[in-house]
Image: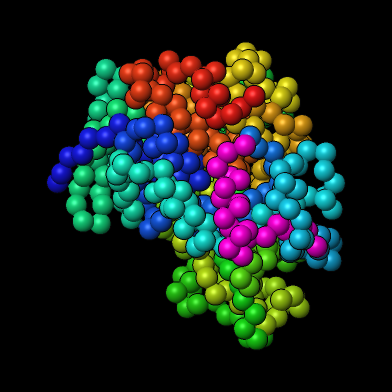
Amino acid sequence: MKTLNTDVLVLGLGSAGSAAVRNALAGGASVIGAEQMPGPGGTSTFGGVNNWEPGVSFDGIHREIARRLLESGDAFVGKTTEYVSSANRYAISDRSGDPYETTLKRFGVHGNDMRRLHYEPDAMAAVLQALMEEADPGGELTLFYNTRFVSLDTRDRQICTCVLSTPDEIVTVCPKIVIDCTGDILPSRMAGCSWAVGEDPKYAYGEEAAPEKATKVLNGITQCFRITETGIDMPGVPEKYNDVDLTGWVEHMNRTLGPVSCFTVYPRGGIYVNMLPTAEGEMYLQYDMEALKHICESRAYRYMRWLAEKGYLRGWEITHMFPLLGIRESYRLVGRHVLTIDDIYNGYAPSVGREQTVALADHAADTHGRGSRCSDTYPGYGIPYSCLLPKEIDNLLVACRGASFTHLAASSARLSRTMLQLGEAAGTAAALCIRDGISPAEVDVGELRKIRRIT
């Protein structure tokens, strides 16, 4: 066992975590980053969600990521070329030839004109890795991959130590600032921060679209996979899934004509398939992750066979099953401000003020599976800095899908480019904390916005 000291510890190196590392380093802080997968990107790479949906964003790291991927041929701007109908249960997004700027808006854009960025996951991981390393000319960065967060200790409203299990040893990290980018906010929950899971009741935040009583309904789960044209007429289901009873799943598909799926063409060939959903979101709370992954993989293989039986995509089969499930929603922080669907309707959080905005989004409030309640889009709304601040711990920032959102607001704010913005804000804030010897709650958001070039 060894002990390391650092200015900033970033737990989880998905979209938000990678951006947080980069900006904290750029602000002069030393950084340790820890990630359970063998590389960065999280759901955007190892989860197979290999496109950025249309959506508004402040300027930031997303432009440099897109530039590098487009120039290398590992990305292109895509559009929907085939839509879901009663006769066809999947949509196809393919190359459009349009510039990147066309992807940066969703509200008010007709479906035929919406554009998204398709990319190769390995290339995305390489770009994120390079951007983190390039921000570290002085050797102030340490990254641990294939690493599990184990535990933490707190004292006087501070996280004092975090224990990590790396492939080689147990490491105790003593950070000044912690940024939780883990998605399920396990570190924040272990530190004693308030959290929520499932649908919030109407009385909690006054959201008209919320149910009268709280439920455990969560946004649906997707097992993404890559398919390639191999010429095999009828794909099989591997024997290791024989222990999963798929009878009810197949009957459900036959009744509903199958789940709606998005088929997104890759720049280097093949298609990634995003089933909407593969499993109901509340299964996240009912199964351990290994068992849930096994069920979702079995459904994915059976779905491909079902498509072939119905006369679709014969000659195609699954050639890569992504190792992470696409978890759209799990545990959420109840922080200093909880973003609500009404804040989104207003375009900002009135109780906080526009000048506190650190991220911009305009995606639909889009839930998948049972309990879907909203599908509106919005003309761009701001996420305030205080959504990253817990009430109970002073040296902690939360920048991930588990930031302080209601269930309905989270269904809009969860997209990758929004997560990049949250990570950038958290990384910049952490660097300001180190520079000035202050806590995240004491950060001058006006200065943060100036550094981030938010106007």
The percent position of residue 419, horizontal first and vertical second, equals 55, 40
> In the current view of this chain or complex, which residue is farthest to the top?
351
Q: Residue at x 43, y 15 (%)?
A: 442
Residue 444 lies, with reference to residue 208, above or below; the image says: above
Q: Position of residue 184 (x, y in %)?
A: 45, 41
Where residue 259 sits, quadrant-wise, is bottom right
Residue 256 visible: no
Magenta range is 59-81
Residue extending farthest to the front is 137
Above or below: residue 292 compared with residue 13: below
- Magenta stretch: includes residue 74: yes
Q: Tell me which residue sits at (37%, 52%) in the image.
A: 36
377 vs 86, left or right, is left
Q: Is residue 260 left or right of residue 68?
A: right
Foreground pick, 27 / 118: 27
Q: Answer with the quarter of the image where residue 160 lies.
A: top left
Residue at x-position 42% and y-position 36%: 26
Rendered image coloring scheme: rainbow
Residue 36 can be seen, yes or no: yes
Residue 274 lies in the magenta-colored region: no
Q: Image quarter for residue 216?
A: top right
All told, the count of numbered labels is 0
Q: Left or right of 183: which side holds 146?
A: left
Q: Quadrant of the C terminus?
A: top right
- Residue at x 71%, y 24% (from the top left corner): 347
Q: Position of residue 378 (x, y in %)?
A: 75, 33
Q: Position of residue 238 (x, y in %)?
A: 50, 77
Q: Is residue 85 above or below residue 382?
A: below
